[in-house]
Each structure stands twice: as structure tokens, then as C-alpha cells.
Image: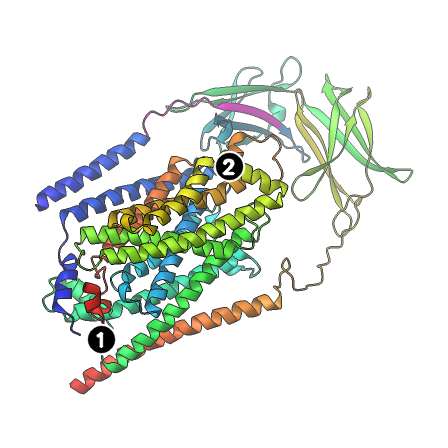
Amino acid sequence: MQADKKLLKDLTPELESTGTGWYITFTIFLGLFIVGIYGLVQQIDKGHIVTGMRDNVVWGFYIVNFIFFMGLSYSGALISGVLHLFHTGWRKPIIRMAELITVISLVIGPFFIFFCIGRLDRLYFLFTHPRIQSPITWDVIAICTDLIGCFIYLYLSFIEDFAILRDYDELNVAPWKKKLYKILSLGYDGSPIQAKLLANARTIMATMIIAIAIIVYSVLAWIFGVTLQPGWHSTIFGPYFVIAAVFSGTGLLIILMWIFRKVYHLEEYITQRHFINVGVLLTVIAAFYGYFTFSDYLTKWYGSIKMDSILIDKLFSEYYSLFIFANYIGILLPGIIIAFPRFRTIRNITVAAVIALLALWVNRYIIVIPTLETPFLPIQDTRPDWIKYSPTWIEWSLTFAGVSIFAMLFMLVSKIAPIISISEMQEKDKDEILK
Amino acid sequence: MKTRLSTTIFSLSFFLMFSLSLFSQGKSVISPYIQLQYFKNSDNSHLLKTTLTYSLNRMEIPLQGMEISFFSEAGGKKLLGKTLTDKIGVALLELKEINNLSLTEEGGWSFSTEFKGNDTIEAGSSELSIKDVKLEMALLEVDSIRTISLKAFTTENKKEIPVSGEVVMVYVPRMFSLLSVGEASLDENGSALLEFPADIPGDKEGNLTIISRFEEHPSFGNVELRETKQWGLPSTNSAPVAHRALWTKTAPRWMIITLSVLLTGVWGHYLFAVISLIRIKRESNKQKKMKS
């Protein structure tokens, strides 16, 4: 299967050679990852006492990270699925990044659940004794289903590129890579029958992963929403979580676009136009996200249920700065930066995306922790450290290990397949993209 | 270039390992808390129990795998045995030949326990003096009232001396812990009567295990008697009629149907995608055959 020579020359050098910078960056991430593993060994050896989690706050950083990574995954699925289905012209250089965000985050996220479980040896009970009335069971089924679906979707999107790389004689890569391309391309050569089969499968899977992403993230939200805990028992938690996920994923997509554009010299392909388009998407989602946030807290505040009032008081006192950052700065600032054309530079949009991403993580934190710190019944002879959560270095190290493995997997995948889809790029409106 | 790269990676790895090794530096010596307890059970067995723990952030942390020595102190220090602490920091020693042990001037036993310590944990010891007490329990029905009759006495110069003014606790075991039925105060004859409630659920036949105890007594330690009696209300553990609800074993039908439809729909589409992949491969094989 043949492809545009220029595209191949521009997009394949990273597959052929690896610079010193790549190795150094990878080693740094690997170092962070090893520190996380050391922390995990400590936790396995000494138990959860080494974390900040206690009798009241039984969910800490790990659950925050789990929700955060799963959100990134679902947003990647939503963005790539929608861009594919609507054949958006400017999608082509960025769709693969969205697809990779989906799968890599989905692989990492559930590990944080494993870190959080006290009796990991009983995990298989979820499969051997499932109760379908339990949202936890829904979540297990949903995550497994989503993981398989996302892998199939990602693989479908890679087949054409594998075929192109297989047939690109000038590609100077290790023999095992060539062999890998040959096996994974399934003998695809772009014949009309094969092209039709692949296109149909991709369209079906794109539709599926959009639906699954919405359902699965709603299920995750219902784990919180169906409880009677203050701050969680909300009917809008499902859509609120979905919108928040897309918000974070869009932010991460912009950051990755900026990094790969800079590092792999893709300025010709990922242009300011892409940043503005994804930035506008971020602003629109920020508006919806802000609307949901305001609606949720307004209803709780106005209802004046005792525990909700205590929680809101806590958010505006102990958690004031985090609350303001997550729900004001994190929502308004990206909007302001992108809303005014004069601010819409690549750098500004990336800064807005970083703020949005951090704010969303903090938002997850202030959803999970303050609620658990607001128990309905006080524990007899309680100690302050049972109520007040404070993460330990082990939780921090595993959090950074999660970010590191995300970065490492992204870096490794970029050495096997182009980070910009060659097959997508050489579709009819290629010229329009390269303008 | 490659050499420089290898050097950089090696240096970074070395730095990382060095940094990790720093975590294990600067450990302070632990001051343990050692507690010795004596138990006399219903089967007339005698146990010594040592608990070895230390305090960290106001939490009691057990010390596991530590060697604990037990001694009899009366008539010269005599080693009774050595055992290791388990994961909750407990070391147990059964005193099989307690009647052969020397007695103190007061006619009791004197025990001690020792932990020798090591590089990271300080040594510790504890002592305990015990006077043997005989606790007797009779379960009677006086005028149709279920009554527990308790008697306790010690032996001095082969004479029985009643234990007076002490409290014996009475319990019934329940699922998670012991239910206190009452406290009996021993009179000048070392006797006490306690009315047993008539409304405690027992097993299918109404059997209950009744426990009477001296608890953490400064002279007698922990002395326990157990007896089973048909004094409870017979329990009928008939399973509730199974119905479909959020909290029963069987889920509501709508839930099963919704989940099944959703999963069938989704996995059906996955199957379609996988079949498409197989057909792509077959198409490629077909074309290869045609070309050859």
C-alpha cells in the first residue's frame, strides 16, 4: 500500500532513529516510575497504614487518580469517535493522539483501584460472585467492555498505517518492527473490498465507543451518585462527570499536540488552526462544565439539608483555595484566553489547557475527599487523623508513577507507529490540512 | 555518542538507587511495650501470653517474629520456654507442668517474660504474680428462674479460702463479640447468684454457651469457665422468601434485561468488527493465491 512520499518522509523519522533527548526523558520518567514502585512495595509490605487513608476517608488520591484517568480515557474516545464520524477536516493530525489517550489512560486508571483495595486477594470475588444490583459490578463490566472496545477501535485505526509502513521500502527500522507491521497489517492492501470492510468496522466501532464512553463514565459517576453521601447524591452526576471528562481530555489533547509538535517538529501538520479549533471546543465544554458545577452546588446550597450545608461551608473554608482554583479559575481562565482572538496563540491555548487539566484533577479531589471528611455520624473517641485526609509520599509517588507510565507508553507507541495517522492525512482533503 | 548516553543513563540510575537507599537511613531505635498475661481456661489449661508492640503516631504496631522467653521466678529463675511473636505481636506458652513449679511465699506463682532486643528494638521485660483460683459455676433453675451459681476459692495450706468482694463477669457469645449478661459480686463465702435472662436467642435447640470470668484480675489473672445449657430461645433461621429487589440475591428483572440487552448490543458490534478483520485477512490471502 503506497502513501504520499512527503508524508512518509515527514512522519516516519521518529520510527527510524531515537535521539538522546528521548532517552533522557524516558529515563527520568522511568526513575519516577521506579520510585512509585518502591512506594507500592512499602504499601504492600506495611499495609494501607502508610497512606493517608483512614476510617473516614477511605478513598484518597488513588480514587481521585482513577476517576481522572478514566475521564481522560472516555474523553479521548468521545473526541476521536465524534471527529471520525463527522469527518471533520481538521481532525486528521490529532485523531490518533485522542485514540491513544483513550487506550493508555484506560490501561492505567484501573491500577489505582488495585492500589486502593485493602484485600486485593478478594478481587476475583467481583467476577465469581457478581451482584448486578451493585454499581461496582456495573463498573467492572463497563471497564472491561470499554477496554476491549477501545483496543479494537485503536487497532482498526492503525491497520492502514501498518500496511503503509510495511510497504515503505525506504523505511530504515529494525527487522522486528517490519515483521510486526507485516503481522498487524493483516495483509491489508487497500483493495475496495478491504477498504469497505475496514471503513464499516471503524464507523461501527466509533459509534460504539461514543456510546460506551458515555455509559461507562456515567456508571462511574453513579458509584458516587447512588450513595446518600452529602455532595455525591445528585441526579446530574452522570452527565456532569461526562462533561468534566471531555473537558480534561480536551485539555490533555492540546498539551500533547504542543509537546509532539515541538519535539517531533510537526509544525507543518499541527498548526495554530488546530489549536484554535480544539481550544474553542475546550471553551464550549468549559461553559457546559461550569453550568453543571453551578447547578449542582446551587441546588445543594438552596436545599439547605444539614449535611450538604456543612459540606458547602467546608468547601468555602478549609478548601477555599482549591475550590476557587477548580471551579472558577479552571473554568473561566481557559474560556477568557480562547474567547478573545488576540490571546489565541499556541502558547496561550496550551497554558489554558494545562490550567484546565490541573483544575479538573483538583475538582475530582474536592468531590471525593471533603465528602468523606463529612460523616453523618461521628466516630467515638475519634482522632483528627481519622477524619482529616492528608496524602503521604507513597500516594504522591504512585500518582507521579501513573503520569510517568502514561508518558512512557505514549513515547513507546510513538516509536512503533506515527503519532499522526498517515492514512488519515492522505485522504482527499489533505491539501486543506496542509494549508 | 553511545558511550556518553550509557554514562548518562548509568549515572542517573546510580543516583536513583542512591536516593532510594537514603530512605532506609536514619532509623531510630524502637522502645517496645511488653505485656504479660495469664489465662486459665475452662479445660483447666494454663497459658502465658506476651504481647510485644510499639507506639507509632499513637497507633499500636505489633512486632512480629520476635523471640520471647518465659520464666518462673519463684525458687530461682527457671526458663519455661521460648516462642516467637505472631503477626499481631503475640507469643503464647502453655504451662503443661504448672503443678511442678515452685511457689512463692504467698503460695502463688511468679512469672516473667523477656525480649532480648536487637539493633533496632530495645530489650524489654515484664513480671506477673498469680494466685491460683478455683472458679465453679452451676446452672440451676430456682423456682423456674434460671440462676447461675458461682463460687470461687483459693487454697492455702491445703485449706479452701473463699474469695470475697471480687466481681465475676458473665457473658454469652454472639456473632461478633461477647454479650454481657451480668456481673456477680462474691460474698464472704465466695459465692454469688445471678439471674439469667430468659429472652436470649440460642441455636436451633435453644443452646447457649455461658461464660463466667475473672477478667484481668491483679491476683488471679484471666480465669474462665464455659458451659452449654438449653437456656436460650430456639432460633428459626428460615430463609426469607426469595424475591427480586435491590437488596436480595436475585436482581429485579428490568435490571437483568437492560444489562443483557446493552451487553449483547455492544459485544455484538465488537463481534462484527472482529469478523471484519478476519474477512480483511481472508481477502488478502485470496488475493495472494490469485496472484500466485
Q: Is residue A159 left or right of residue B178?
A: left
Q: Residue furthest left?
A: B1
Q: Amino acid at mark 2?
A: Phe
> What residue is drawn where x is 18% and y is 55%?
A267
Amino acid found under the numbered disc labelled 1: Gly
Is B29 magenta? The answer is: yes
Res A363 quadrant in image? top left
Residue A368 screen position, x and y as percent: 49, 44
Magenta-drawn segment: B24-38
Same chain shared by disc 1 and disc 2: yes
Please, is residue A431 above or below residue A320 in the view? below
Q: Secondary structure at mark 1?
A: loop
**Which of the pair A422/A41 is nearer the observer?**
A422
Image side of residue A330 versus residue A385, left or right: left
Tags 1 and 2 in contact by the CB under 8 Å rule?
A: no
Displayed quadrant of residue A62: top left
